[in-house]
C-alpha cells in the first residue's frame, strides 16, 4: 500500500529552543472531531465530543447513531455525540460547508505527507517504549506500536506509507508541554486503534480509521474513506495546538477553538 506515515516530535533537551516543523493547517476540517468521505459507523455506546461531518455521502451513511433531525434540517443529533452530525444532503448551508472542509482535509494531508528531512523507519516499523522528540518521523511501510510511547515538546509529525496499528492497551503519553493538537499522524494505509488503547493527536488518514472496543483518542479523526467505532471514545475539545482554525460558520463555532494544525 502506498503512502506515508510521519510523526514529528521534539527532544526534551531542546523543548525550550526548538522551533520544530511548521504547523499543518487543517482549515475548516479542524472544526470536526470526525470528518469522513464515506461514512461513520458506531457499535453503541460510543462517546464523541465534538461535531461530525460526512461528504459527499448522505446522512444514511451514519450508522448506529439513532439520529434525530434538527428543526432546520441542517444537522442531526445523537445521544452518543456531544455535538452535531452534518451530512452532504442536509439543508443549506451544510453541503457547501462540508465540501470546503473535505477540501481542506485533503490539502492538509498532501501538505503533511510531503514534509521531508525526517527520521526514517525508526525501529524498522515496530516501536514501543520510545520518547519522541520534536521533528518529523517517516516510515516507508507499516508502523506498529507494540508498547506505550511518549511525546515530549510542542509540535510532532508522523508519516506512514502503510498501515498504522496501535496494539491493545498501548498509550501515547504527553510530557514536556506536548499537546494533542500539535501531534499529527499522516497515514496512507488504514489506521487501527486496538481495544483499550489510549491515544493523542490528529489522524489524517488517506483510507479508513478504526477504533476497536474501549479505544480512546484525544484528537481528531479525518478520513478520506470511512471511520468505524466500536464502543470507543473521541474527545476533540481542549486539544491546544499551533494551527487552530478561527473561521467557521456560526453553527460550528463552538468547535473552532479546538481546531489543530499538524505536521
Image (cartoon, grey):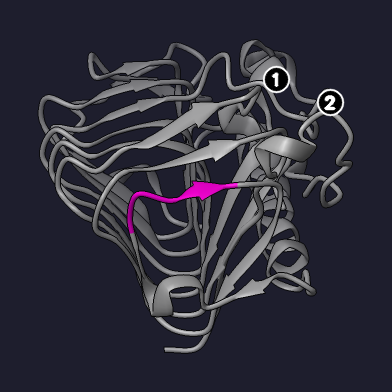
Task: Tell me the distance, in whole angstroms, between the alpha carbons under discs 1 and 2.
Answer: 7 Å
Where is residue 184 drawn, in percent x and y? 60, 49
Instruction: Residue 97: tell me if it is visible.
Output: no
Q: Which region of the structure is painted magenta? A: 128-132
For label 1, the SS is helix
Q: Indicate the quadrant where residue 95 lies.
A: top right
For label 2, the SS is loop
The image shows residue 96, relative to residue 115, as above or below, that is above
Q: Give the residue displayed 71% in from the left and 16% down from the top.
A: 257
The image shows residue 43, relative to residue 70, as above or below, that is below
Residue 107: mark: none
- Comparing 170 with 259, the one in front is 170
Q: Is residue 35 left or right of residue 143?
A: right
The rendered magenta stretch, by its main secondary structure, is classed as: loop
Where is residue 226 drawn, in percent x and y? 36, 58
Residues at circles 1 and 2 in contact by the CB criterion of under 8 Å: yes
Residue 247: mark: 2
Q: Give the residue displayed 50% in from the left and 35% down from the top.
A: 90
Which residue lies most toward the front here? Answer: 13
Q: Give the residue displayed 52% in from the left and 78% down from the top.
A: 121
Q: Quadrant of the N terminus?
A: bottom left
Where is residue 30 drawn, in percent x and y? 66, 35
- Comparing 24 with 171, the one in front is 171
Residue 256: mark: 1
Where is residue 26 drawn, in percent x and y? 73, 44
The image shows residue 210, relative to residue 217, as above or below, that is below
Q: Give the residue displayed 72% in from the left and 53% down from the top.
A: 263
Instruction: Residue 129: tell me if it is visible.
Output: yes
Q: Is residue 225 left or right of residue 3?
A: left
Magenta span has 161? no
Q: Is residue 149 left or right of residue 64?
A: right
* Circle 2 crowding by C-alpha within 10 Å: few under 14, some 14–19, many from 20: few
Amino acid at each position: 500500500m502506498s503512502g506515508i506515515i510521519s510523526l514529528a516530535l521534539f527532544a526534551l533537551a531542546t523543548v525550550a529552543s526548538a522551533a520544530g516543523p511548521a504547523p499543518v493547517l487543517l482549515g475548516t476540517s479542524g472544526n470536526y472531531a470526525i470528518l469522513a468521505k464515506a461514512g461513520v459507523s458506531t457499535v453503541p455506546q460510543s462517546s464523541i465530543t465534538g461535531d461530525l461531518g460526512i461528504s459527499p455521502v448522505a446522512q444514511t451513511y451514519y450508522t448506529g447513531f439513532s439520529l434525530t433531525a434538527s428543526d432546520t434540517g441542517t444537522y442531526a443529533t445523537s445521544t452518543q455525540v456531544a455535538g452535531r452530525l452534518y451530512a452532504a444532503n442536509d439543508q443549506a448551508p451544510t453541503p457547501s460547508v462540508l465540501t470546503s472542509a473535505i477540501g481542506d482535509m485533503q490539502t492538509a494531508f498532501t501538505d503533511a505527507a510531503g514534509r521531508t528531512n525526517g527520521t526514517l523507519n525508526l525501529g524498522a516499523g515496530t516501536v514501543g517504549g520510545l520518547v519522541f522528540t520534536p521533528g518529523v518521523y517517516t516510515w516507508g511501510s507499516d508502523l506498529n506500536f507494540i508498547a506505550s510511547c511518549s511525546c515530549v515538546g510542542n509540535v510532532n509529525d508522523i508519516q506512514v506509507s502503510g498501515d498504522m496499528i496501535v496494539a491493545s492497551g498501548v498509550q501515547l503519553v504527553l510530557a514536556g508541554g506536548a499537546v494533542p493538537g500539535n501531534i499529527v499522524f499522516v497515514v496512507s494505509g488504514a489506521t487501527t486503534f486496538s481495544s483499550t488503547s489510549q491515544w493523542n493527536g490528529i489522524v489524517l488518514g488517506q483510507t479508513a480509521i478504526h477504533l476497536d472496543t474501549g479505544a480512546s483518542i484525544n484528537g481528531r479523526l479525518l478520513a478520506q474513506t470511512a471511520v468505524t467505532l466500536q464502543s470507543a471514545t473521541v474527545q476533540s475539545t481542549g486539544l491546544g495546538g499551533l494551527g487552530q482554525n478561527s473561521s467557521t460558520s456560526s453553527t460550528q463555532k463552538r468547535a473552532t477553538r479546538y481546531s489543530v494544525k499538524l505536521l
